[in-house]
Image (cartoon, rainbow, N blue to C red):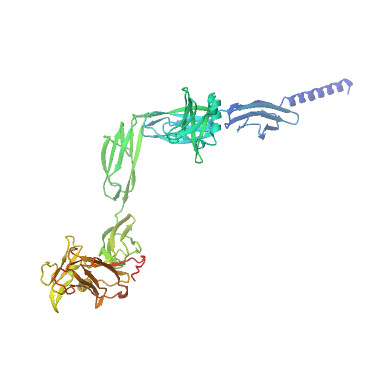
Amino acid sequence: MSYKIVVVIVLLGLIGLMASESLAQESIKIRPFRADPSAICAGQGTILSWDVSGATKVTIEPDIHSVGLNGSIEVFPRNNTTYELTASNNDRDAVAKVKVVVKDCIAIEKFLVEPQKVCKGSNATLQWKVVGASNVTIDHGIGEVPPAGVREVTGNESTTYNLTAINSTYVFSWDEIPGKDNERLLEFLAGKFDIDWIKTATLEKIDIGKAIKIYAGNNSLTLKLNDIKNGVILEIQDGRTYKFIAKIETDKLNIYNSTKNSTANSTLAVDLSCPKIISFEVDHPNIIKSSKATLKWNVTNAENVSIDGIREENHTGSRVVTPNSTIVYTLNASNGTNFAISETLVNVRNKFPEIEDFTASPSSIVRGTGSMLSWNTTGADRVSINPDIGEVASCGSRRVTVERDTRYILMAGNASGEVTKIAPVNVTNIAYDFVARAPYAEWHAEIDGQEYRVKFPSPVTSTNGYARYFDDTHSILEIGPRRGGKIIGDFTGDMTNSGYFIDPRDTLNFSAELSDWTSLLTNVIITPMLGANSLGSYNIYAPSLDLRETKDQISLRDDAHRNRGIYLIVDCNGYDWGDNININEMKIVRESRDAKPIDLF
């Protein structure tokens, strides 16, 4: 090979190497590295975006580190920050920078209402997002809200909602004036409003704590708290005024100074021409199959009204329907682009079960005694009685014993549904009332060994004495023995017929007194008898103030479960005429099982 050829080959190789190095140096390209936006308020974010070619590695600092050749990322710098993108390959590095400026400001990123137009009475949603604010409020009764949120509003009329975002600094606590915040407040007012005299001023609360007065000589100013305690108005003697923000925090009323504020508004438009469904209802929402129900509706501002696609001619009207199964009827009212929809449900069932009879006999009983429940149902596959009984046959009877008023509920059900009926059992603690049952007792007089029948009621002029009601309400029994004898009321037969048996909880409550407190003649002995045994002897003696009335409670526990009759004997004690006494109360009272026993001894 000639020398010239060798030289040519070497030169060509050098040229190729230089071209290769030049291409390698130009292979990394960083298309715009951007921050959008490049200036933000503290708390806001910005989007970094980049597009790199010819590199094998890309990093972004600070804090981001390795990323792909292209992409975007949202960052939230707290301070002014310069982001540096470095793209590299085996031969070289390329660098791009972008600066993000962080300002101390308020940004209302979003405040809108959706939808912007609604029919009257329909709802829309307010949405907002604010950064850099310590206090955010929305007017029209909404008040203070969090920095970001949503709120449903009703469009009754077109309304422009105004959002106000404020950044504030703490000034003083209303609760610490006068007190430890005196100096803090005075220094703020002196600096903010250039008031020299305030440095030696006196502070005091006035108007029942609703205002603070600061004064020195002839100079003064007043801070007035509003009624809802969210604002304070400063009124200076020279005519200047200023508004502060008030907040209740941890049970203290703190006052803030507004340093920055920003506002935004959003309007909700209300279309008054929208169709409106005033009512859409059914008279019988639950019916048996093959039965009828009537749909009724009232619509305004509509050109077309239809129910399930069938057009109705009248805006107000009714339609009889006979559905075979449960159905939701849909009413549609429209006038071009606007429409309104309402639905109503009709439940269709097979025949319900029937409760032909459900009674409690007797329906009123003495505590601890029984009542008979009887029932008869048809068409039911399940029947129950509550409380305490549970499932029962479709018809039957059950004796129940109760201590207090009880409402027994019988439920009969099948696949179509359930029906119920109530049988109340009322309970009284009066086992036997002698005054009320007086007409059913056997009354007689014993005089000088002879027995005379006494009719009830008998007149006070009866020769052998009398027994009658003292009052028209029949609540007081008046008894008058005559001619040295006694009046006896025998309640044995009536108590036996009523089924009364003595219970261990029974107490005889007894109360008697003079019929005529001006009488000086009465001197009687009253003796309630249980069988042949005396339950006590009580003297009513007119001349003695201590013996003009008597009361007692007599336990019958020792005679429990015996059916022994009770007699009432009123003996004139040897006196003649004028011996009239009133039995105000004579009842056998039965306490509940959970009541504390009465200590009678």
Residue 487 versus residue 530: which sits nearer the camera? Answer: 487
Q: Is residue 52 visible?
A: yes
**Quarter of the rendering occupied by the N terminus:** top right
Residue at the image position 26 percent from the left and 41 percent from the top: 319
Residue 7 versus residue 278: which sits nearer the camera? Answer: 278
Residue 194, how many percent across, how many down?
Answer: 54, 23
Taking the image as shown, residue 510 lies to the left or right of residue 49, namely: left
Taking the image as shown, residue 347 lies to the left or right of residue 15, namely: left
Residue 203 versus residue 466: which sits nearer the camera? Answer: 203
Q: Quadrant of residue 115?
A: top left
**Quarter of the rendering occupied by the C terminus:** bottom left
Q: Report the number of numbered marks.
A: 0
Residue 122, how many percent across, how many down?
Answer: 38, 34
Taking the image as shown, residue 198 lies to the left or right of residue 58, namely: left
Vertical order, 448 against 406 (above or below) = below
Q: Quadrant of residue 311?
A: top left
Residue at the image position 12 percent from the left and 72 percent from the top: 464
Considering every residue shown, the one lying at the far bottom of the view is 449
Vertical order, 441 against 213 (above or below) = below
Residue 330, how many percent across, how many down?
Answer: 34, 40
Q: Quadrant of residue 392?
A: bottom left
Q: Is residue 169 visible?
A: no
Residue 391 versus residue 428: which sits nearer the camera? Answer: 428
Considering every residue shown, the one lying at the far top of the view is 4
Residue 110, how many percent across, how many down?
Answer: 50, 30
